Image (cartoon, coloured by chain):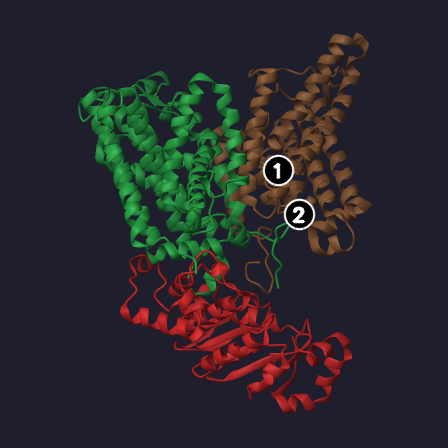
Amino acid sequence: MALWLTQLFNGLSVSSILLLIALGLAITFGLMRVINMAHGEFIMIGAYSAYLVQKIFQSSLPQGWFDAYYPLALLLAFALAFAIGLLLETALIRFLYGRPLDSLLATWGVGLVLQQLARTIFGAPNVGVTSPSWLDGGLRIMTGVVFPYKRLFILALVALVLLAMYLYIYRSDAGRRMRAVMQNRDMAACLGISTRRVDAVTFAIGSGIAGVAGCALTLIGPIGPTIGTNYIVDAFMVVVLGGVGKLIGTAAGALGIGMLNTLFEWGSTASLGKVLVFLCIVAFLQWKPMGLFAVRSRSLDG
Amino acid sequence: MDLELQPGELRFLIGPNGAGKTTMLDVLCGKVKPSSGKVIFRGRANAVDVSKRREHEIARLGIGRKFQTPSVFPGLTVDENLEIAMSQNRGVWAVLRAKTSKFDRMRIEANLELIGLADKKRLRAGLLSHGEKQWLEIGMLLLQEPEVLLLDEPVAGMTDRETEKTGELLRQIVRKRTVVVVEHDMEFVRRFASRVTVMHEGKLLKEGTMEEVQRDERVAEVYLGRRRDADAVGSTA
Amino acid sequence: MPVSPTTTRGRLWLLAGYGAALLLLLAAPLYLSDFRLNLLAKCLAFAIAALGLDLLWGYTGILSLGHGVFFGLGGYAMAMHLKLEASGGKLPDFMGWTGVAKLPWFWEPFRSFAFAAAMGIVLPALLALFLGFFTFRNRIRGVYFTILTQALVIIVFTLFVGQQKYTGGTNGLTGFATLFGEPLKSPGMKTALYFATVAGLLAAFLLCRYLVKSRLGKVLRAIRDGENRVRFLGFDPSLYQMAAFAVSAALAGLAGMFFVLHVGIISPSAMAIVPSVEMVLWVAIGGRGTLIGAVVGAVVLNEAKSGLSESFPDMWTFFLGGLFIVATVFLPGGLVGLVRQLAGPFGRRNPSHEQLGESSGEQQPVAPREHSG
């Protein structure tokens, strides 16, 4: 019983991290159809901003204030990733709309450059980020079952981000404009919406959320220049599995992959577990490739 | 609704926007699977329920489809477009070993003459004008030699002269096979004295000759009931 | 009337160019040091993989980021044979370290060179067919397929690292001594291997050329331009895509085998994500959709890599990243496209086919450049 509970929680925790990473993709990939392979590097940017904020607190602010660094780090992570996302969209992505494979390759190059930049600035080895003390310890459920506060915090953070995204996309004016542009660009432009601006901001938001995810990742382990690449493919699988353009699908996809991963790794070895998860995903796509394509137009391939 | 076609028949499908004309063609060629109902095709083979087959199987049975916007392969030359459209064994191995025989060559050349693209056969299809693309696609369909041909607004967006030429091409096509044409251009429809089916909101409204259809009150109501469509009928594209 | 390059004079020049290049390659042992020759041989092996990738991406419009896996499978097949030969009748050393007492059954047949060489081609092709069957048939394509291939890389990588008992884990397989009893390091062997690679590349090139010029090649390009339209012509695109994918994977496997013979080691890092994507860059830089472009791209980039990364390893990564951006945004036709553009009116084909055909696989692109009906 205790073991099951622990595994269940682990699965949930893995899912929540996947979801946090995939949420940014759900915007850039799901809504904008841009394959941003540099998404992992936005995660890295978020992680290193947390590292920086922590350093500043440690070196130049009173000891007692240290615990307050984390909320600030979250904000900075979002802001920095947002800004760089905006820059990337303006400088590069906008030339590649409608050419998904090209945008994939170009952003992969961007990712490579950002990674190397991080390596040059911070060094290749991983660095640790000390989590705030209020996240130490855990919630004791029963004998042998402790839910670490950090993991619980990430769960809460994911819920918060999900809620914020929902409110922004479906309940705000800006979100309505965004959906309008994504659904019918020409029409939206005719109605006086600046599609350029909406594109840029949408992409930046997706990047910003990746920054938040990176900040969250500092809680569960050391960070390095390649931190993003470890998660990025899994996150793309989440979006593909969940079906594009639907938040609920992304959540379901994350839950599915996270749970399966935990289950299989528990039942076999880590490497075999990955193979099994992949086979499950391919098998699932046999049954439901939908969401992946749905063309209905008078022109065939338009 | 029920729609029955006789071999060798030319049938026009008309109706206001959203009547389901294009969807009808989609169902016939397998692009859209019907939620209920059957499409029975008695071709060279025995009667088959086409709605259960995949698109390429349907195409091999002998049902060809032309889409509203020209869909040729822009990266291939005109010649190459025709070459792969030709009726042939479409297995991977067969296609790899395929040689263009003298007879095939003749068919392609004759076709090029017919569609008037003989001097452009080495040009990439992506560089053709809108009308030329439409003709190329018609040429491809001719070489595909389907028994049933489904055409979606073949003259939409064409100049008068292009329309005329397309009309000529259609006459050629109609001779040998069953053809279903979706068309808004009433003038164009009138030129072919044949049966017309009027659709409205997914239902069959009236079937008959053009004159019968024009005299029908319900048809007039459907068209005139919406000003925009009435305009469409009056000042054909 | 646009001029096509199939004028007799243009053709003669082209043939002369190919002939000169072949002569240069064949005479390379005469004017290159052993080290340089070995490097060139490695580049030529990569060029074989690039040809396969180009067939798939440039001609059929399917981007695989998983070719490192196929390359690696070929490499491992050859490495297993070499390892067994180096170990004599004994168990390979790493197996002893990990506590394996008896040679695993699937290692046994790799004692035969013919079997190993066949597997190096067949295994990648089978894996490609397997993956292709479950994706293309369900019309999983475009970026979705690309993402799945990347997932394939990750799982195969983890699998090979994880199954240390059978694969040598992170270290991979190395410590080879001989092939057919002849030391791998001997100058005669080096030259022989070099010529074998040239022959392999030539064969791969001719095979791809035959495929591309056949009617099959036209169908593949048609699939790239409009997969759905092809379907309504009566072709089943998934079969063609599977065939292209399998041939492409087999060529990558062949390349991997040559790679191991030249380099003397294969490890999971050779089939990780970065090498897989680098392969794509070779094709992109050289010029996708042209066979010679793939070869040129692979050779040029790898020569550049060995030059740059030896002296400035950091610079290489920046350079690589920058190249990706430049190649996709400014140079969609690659080097060959550039040359054709400079050559003026003889440029025959618009290389940036993606705008024309790619959208087929996607739901409405965000910013459609063309209006649809």
Q: Residues within 10 Å of mark 1 (few under 14, many from 20)?
A: some
For disc 2, the chain is A
Q: Where is residue A283 in the image (x, y as percent from the top left)?
A: 50, 46
Q: Residue at x 35, y 67 (%)?
A: B88
Looking at the rendering, which quadrant does residue B163 occupy? bottom right
Q: Where is residue A41 in the image (x, y as percent from the top left)?
A: 61, 29
The image shows residue C364, relative to residue A297, as above or below, that is above
Residue position for label 2:
A245
Image side of residue B176 versus residue B67, left or right: left
Q: What amino acid is at disc 2?
A: Gly
For disc 1, the chain is A
Does residue A218 appear in the picture of this structure? no
Mark identifier at residue B75: none
Image side of residue B156 versus residue C115, left or right: right
Colour in which chain A is drawn: brown
Q: What amino acid is at disc 1?
A: Leu
Residue position for label 1:
A92
Looking at the rendering, which quadrant does residue A132 occupy? top right
Colour in which chain C is drawn: green
Q: Residue at x 41, y 68 (%)?
A: B60
Q: Residue at x 30, y 29 (%)?
A: C41
The image shows residue C213, relative to residue C57, as above or below, that is below
Colour in which chain B is drawn: red
- In the rendered image, residues at marks 1 and 2 fall on the same chain: yes
The image shows residue B221, relative to residue C114, as above or below, that is below
